Image (spheres, rainbow, N blue to C red):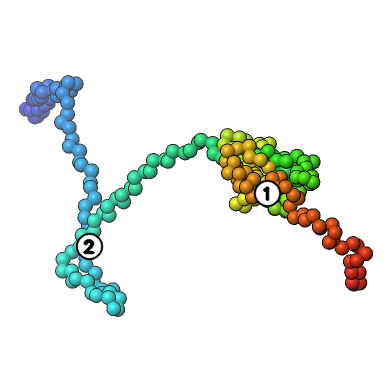
Amino acid sequence: MRALTLVSLLLVVGLVFGLFALPSPAPDDPGKRLPAVPQEEPLQARPQKVPPATRDVTPRGMTLGPKVTGPLLRVEPPEPERAPEKEPEPQNTAPTERTERLFRPVVVGLGKIESGKHSVRLAGIEPLAPDASCGEPAWPCGMMGRSALRRLIRARAIDCTIPAGAEALPETTSCRLGDIDLSEWLVQQGWAKAASARYQEAEDASKRDKRGQWSTARPGFTPDAEETAPFSADLPSPTPL
């Protein structure tokens, strides 16, 4: 019994001694770095193997495609090409000449026209005065010229020029009835003189042809017109309705 107790005591002492004799783990070295873990490269798009079609889908009348014996590869479509960007075109900011249309114009004088709130004088000419007289014997060329301009326009719309840089229709400007320059027409017919070199040729032509104010006699008038004109008593009676 005493021997068993002694053996047990020796085992306990040996176990304790063994625990103290084991080497203690070394503390972590802060300066020592762990080996870097290799990172995997990003996966790139790889062609995918696609099994060949097992069913013929070629429509009638169409040529059959080549027979495929191996697997097909499906690849990514190429990126569409972008069209080159066009440079913006430089904008012309310089002021330009434009026109304004006047409706139902009224001829109030030779070279003076009114329409609504607008009142313009034709540019480049020296028109006859309303009470001007011409020829010998004298005839009212000013009134006849105004009547001729009225018969030409007949309340039809005219286009008048707004010069470049101007915001509104000026008081003196050039106007047109379709393709007819009204200032040039008055000079050609002899109802105005040229105040601009552009109408000088028209004035020379009207002088040569003796039109309007350059005529020695009243246009359309003959000396025996009064003698041959019928009196009102000689005219036939109007037919009753």
Determine the secondary structure under disc 2: strand
- Please name the residue shown 39% across and 40% down the image: 87
Q: Which mark is residue 50?
A: 2
Judged left or right of residue 127, residue 236 is right
- How many numbered circles are shown? 2
Could you tell me if the residues under marks 2 and 1 are in contact, i.e. CB atoms within 8 Å?
A: no
Distance (Cα) linking label 2 and label 1? 96 Å
Judged left or right of residue 119, residue 23 is left
What's the residue type where badge 1 is placed? Arg
- Measured along the vertical axis of the image, is residue 199 above or below residue 3? below
Q: Position of residue 199 (x, y in %)?
A: 60, 42
Q: Which mark is residue 6?
A: none
> Which of these two is toward me, 156 or 138?
138
Q: Position of residue 161 (x, y in %)?
A: 61, 42
- Please name the residue shown 20% across and 38% down the image: 39
Farthest-out residue, right: 233
- Measured along the vertical axis of the image, is residue 189 above or below residue 197? below
Farthest-out residue, bottom: 60
Q: Is residue 140 visible?
A: no
Q: Quadrant of the N terminus?
A: top left
> Which of these two is toward me, 65 or 44?
65
Q: Which residue, given by chain and number where applicable, does mark 1 sit on? A: 211
Q: Is residue 205 visible?
A: yes
What's the residue type where badge 2 is placed? Val
